[in-house]
Amino acid sequence: MDAFMKKAILDYLPAIELEVETMLAEWKPGTVRDIARDMTDFMLRLTSSILFGIEDTDVAYKIGKMIDHWVHLNHELGWEPLWLIRQLQDVTASCSSSQTTWKPRSWV
């Protein structure tokens, strides 16, 4: 539970700032935005970044989208962890960033 203590949450500020700046850089005056979509994308990037320590926002977003899809599949079809793990392996293998070093647990 240490991850949710106040002192731990303060450590997430750099990741939050990076994601906010990335999102706002895309916003231009006079354009119409789908705020629901923007906030969903923001949270997918942020949670993947924080949970997996991935600083590459595109990779974090892809992983977040896969997890979101997997969660929805769980509610519709049942448990499909191998699909998610294969997708995560594909994304991390294709990433040229040296910061992306996450690998699935060996028990899979």
Image (tube, grey):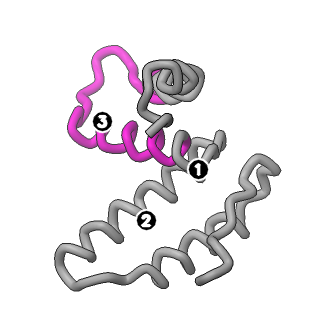
Alpha-carbon span between mark 1 and mark 3: 19 Å
Alpha-carbon span between mark 1 and mark 2: 13 Å
Q: Residues within 10 Å of mark 3 (few under 14, many from 20)?
A: few
- For label 1, the residue is 52
Q: Nearer the viewer, mark 1 or mark 3?
A: 1
Q: Earlier in the sequence, mark 1 or mark 3?
A: 3
The residue shown at (68%, 59%) is: 102
77 up-or-down from 60: above or below: below
Q: Amino acid at mark 3?
A: Met
The residue shown at (44%, 26%) is: 5
Furthest residue in direction top, as rendered: 29
2 up-or-down from 82: above or below: above
Q: Amino acid at mark 2?
A: Met
- For label 2, the residue is 66
Q: Amino acid at mark 1?
A: Phe
The part of the chain drawn in magenta is 22-49
Furthest residue in direction right, as rendered: 98
- For label 3, the residue is 39
Provide residue 46's location: percent of width, then percent of height.
Answer: 46, 38
25 up-or-down from 107: above or below: above
Q: Earlier in the sequence, mark 3 or mark 2?
A: 3
Provide residue 16's location: percent of width, then percent of height.
Answer: 49, 25
Q: Left or right of 96: which side holds 11? A: left
